[in-house]
Amino acid sequence: MPSLLSTYSKDELLKKLKTQKKMLIIHSFVVFLMLIFAIVSTVEKGFSFHTFLPLFFIPMFFVMLFEMKKIKKELASRL
């Protein structure tokens, strides 16, 4: 069964890859800030909701990374 990415043109895939890279960098920065905030919050006030908040967003980072790899693979298959 063909993937959804196979319906995109090469230019659309390149644009999607560029957007995915930007979003991955932004998401990484936000998760990093949440980790810093969680550490500071835990040290000052003990365990709270803020301590575990980054754990909910870290899996999204890996999903975005996996999607980026799929786009790169699709682009490589078209050369």
Image (cartoon, helix red, strand yellow):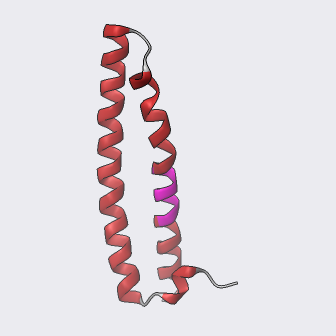
Front one among 47 and 8: 47
Give the left or right position of residue 17, taking residue 72 as reference: left
Q: Position of residue 18 (x, y in %)?
A: 32, 70
Residue at 30% across, 42% down: 30
Residue located farthest toward the front when viewing the structure as drawn: 49
**Quarter of the figure with the N terminus:** bottom right
Residue at 47% across, 81% down: 75
Q: Give above or below for 7 relative to 73.
A: below
The boundaries of the magenta stretch are: 61-67
Q: Is residue 14 magenta?
A: no
Count up the numbered dots.
0
Q: Give above or below for 55 relative to 60.
A: above
Q: Position of residue 73 (x, y in %)?
A: 53, 75
Query: Which is the main secondary structure of the residues drawn in magenta?
Result: helix
Front one among 79 and 43: 43
Front one among 40 and 79: 40
Residue at 32% across, 17% down: 41
Q: Position of residue 32 (x, y in %)?
A: 33, 36
Q: Could you say which quadrant of the image residue 3 lies in?
A: bottom right
Residue at 50% across, 65% down: 67
